[in-house]
Amino acid sequence: MTPGKLIVITGPAAVGKSTVSRAIQAVFATKGQICMVLELDTFGRGVPREWVSIGTHRGANSELGFDYVRTEAGSMGLALGDDGRRVLIAFHRSVAAVASSGMNAVCETIVYDEDDWRDWSEALHNIPVCWVRLCAPVEVLDEREKFDRSRVFQGLAKGMSARKRVGTYDIEADTSTETANSIVQRIIAKLGS
């Protein structure tokens, strides 16, 4: 079976991954083609609360899963345990399965570190991927987080932006200076090449 078109969009919280993903999905729809949006956040909602710590909630097994810690500077950091790594590995392989089935997909995710990038590369090794990295100045991301009070993880954008850059990307865009439509047009053009 021919794999579907796969776009993997990475970047910190509040950078515009969802906006760009939904716009890509709409472009596919106008062509009469289905395109799924796969979100690490949605996948992660299946993790039991005991494997997550954030704010005042301290999951009993969070050191094995996802431990969100607020720094003195007000940013939010993430420490991954062994089970947290396995969740990321499972997500990577789930994305690969969707694309391998012939389904077009846009994936919203983070690349946590070098090990995470290696696993993405392994999971998608036989699948053509358009890798997209979105960024924006931390001040812009902070303002976007403050504006969106529904965000549980206030400060996560700053914490994620401070992480070491990992991976190689086909398209990089600053969402503070380039519109979502322009970014989408570059992605669609890349898929056509």
Image: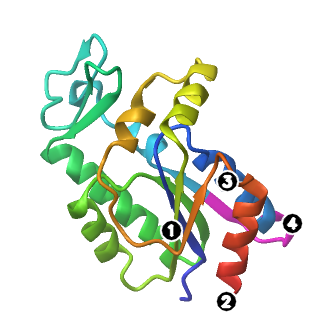
Q: Is residue 147 left or right of residue 118?
A: right
Which residue does the numbered mark 4 point to in the structure image?
Answer: 30
Q: Is residue 113 left or right of residue 170?
A: left
Q: Amino acid at mark 3?
A: Val
Sequence-wise, the earlier of marks 4 and 3 is: 3
Identity of the residue drawn at 54% across and 82% down: 3
Q: Tell me where residue 49 appears, x and y as whole percent.
A: 29, 25
Q: Which residue is mark 2?
A: 193
Disc nearest the viewer among 1 and 2: 2
Indicate the position of residue 35 as horizontal and vertical percent values: 67, 64
- Look at the numbered disc 2 and give the secondary structure of its residue: loop
Name the residue at the top extreme. 56
Task: Quote the CA–CA distance across marks 1 and 4.
Answer: 21 Å
Is the residue marked by circle 3 packed among few (<14), some (14-19), or many (20+) residues within 10 Å? Answer: many
Viewer-nearest residue: 88 or 193: 193
- Any mark on residue 20, and which? 3
First in sequence: mark 1 or mark 3?
3
C-alpha span from label 1 to label 3: 19 Å
Of badges 1 and 4, nearer the viewer stands: 4
Label 1 sits on what residue type? Answer: Val
